[in-house]
Amino acid sequence: MRRMKVWFPEFFTEAHRKPGEGDVLAEELRKFGIDCQLDLTEDCSFIFCGTIWRMNLVKEERQRFPDIPTIHYNWDLYPFQLIPMKTYRRATPDLWAPYLEEIATCRDIWVPSQCTVDRTREFVGRADSVVIKTSVRPWDYAKPVTGRYAVDVMRKYPDPNRDLAAESCVAMGIPIIETKTATPWEAFKTNIAESRFLISAQFEASTGGLTLMEGYWHGKPALISNSPRHGGIDYFGDRATYFQWDNPILCRKALLDMYDNTPVVDIDEARTWIMQEYSEYAMASRMAKRFWELYDESR
């Protein structure tokens, strides 16, 4: 088997934040001939930066071997990060401006969904981003049950639909929990595993919220905005229920129908599908295919 070396700082991505998570991805990549390193050496074929939060480390280390091409995994580019607006304060401009410069000149840009391809074209001027869908790591729960409440899985960043799920559920008398991605871990697992269904109502979300997939593992159906900037469409396809993203009345109708006629998920089939499409092995396979394409192009 052919082999290449890649510097993958801390084996860290937005989907691999906890200790050991990225190690599993790196081990799966080795099965495809990609030997990931924690240190940059001159025999590396590529630098793979898995998140904006490792950009400065990459910029510093790359000075030692400036000819090694860099690949950036760009998880999202939202207007509130990049454009000053009267209605909200721009998020960390001293971080995002340099990041745009970095990905404008790197060898390759990987993104988690088509809507992120579109935003990269808009804000960076590059139309060549490659969709590499991420992995998810399902967790165990002793006995999931079908509860009486819905869960909004999204955090509260500036988005025209940020409060749509909660407001619509209240209007229809449907109990709802908003996790805001800040719920303690054990309580979070209970909230998901004992819910009735999950909601991702945002206008824009690069993956749609990977909690949707974690819930699907436990038989929780997903109600998703059909916005063209919602990456959940890429991940679920026809396995989710969709509502018209810019019509609150249709959102309420969809919510009521989900509550009264909750879709039944075949858990065994859902888990088989998730492992086929969104395991660490599946993500490594997608990454390796692109690594080797770039490698062969450089020869």
Image: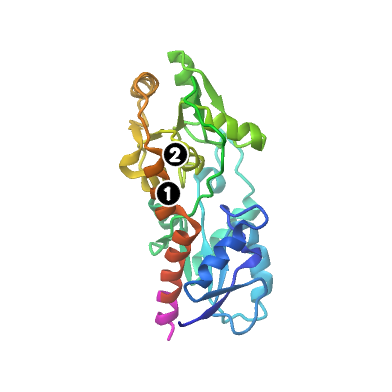
Residue 68: horizontal and vertical position, in percent?
Answer: 56, 79
Residue 5: horizontal and vertical position, in percent?
Answer: 56, 78
Question: Is 116 included in the stretch rendered in magenta?
Answer: no
Q: Secondary structure at mark 1?
A: helix
Direction left: furthest residue: 238
The quarter of the image holding the N terminus is bottom left
Q: Earlier in the sequence, mark 1 or mark 2?
A: 2
Does 225 appear above or below 30?
above
The residue tagged 1 is 274
The quarter of the image holding the C terminus is bottom left
Pick whichever, 13 or 185, lies toward us: 185
The residue tagged 2 is 216
Magenta highlight range: 293-299
Question: Is 294 included in the stretch rendered in magenta?
Answer: yes
Residue 191: horizontal and vertical position, in percent?
Answer: 57, 29
Residue at horizontal 42%, vertical 49%?
274
Callout 1–callout 2 Cβ contact below 8 Å = yes
Q: On residue 17, which mark appears?
A: none
Direction bottom: furthest residue: 299
Q: Secondary structure at mark 2?
A: helix
* Residue 264 quadrant: top left
Residue 294: horizontal and vertical position, in percent?
Answer: 43, 76
Residue at horizontal 61%, vertical 45%?
91
Disc 2 residue type (three-letter): Tyr
User: Magenta region's main secondary structure?
Assistant: helix
- State the scheme by which the image is colored: rainbow
Pick whichever, 182 or 161, lies toward us: 182
Taking 169 as reference, is 102 left or right?
right
Q: Decide: few, some or many residues near mark 1? Use Cα within 10 Å; few <14, some 14-19, many ≥20.
A: many
Does 155 appear above or below 284?
above
* Residue 240 quadrant: top left
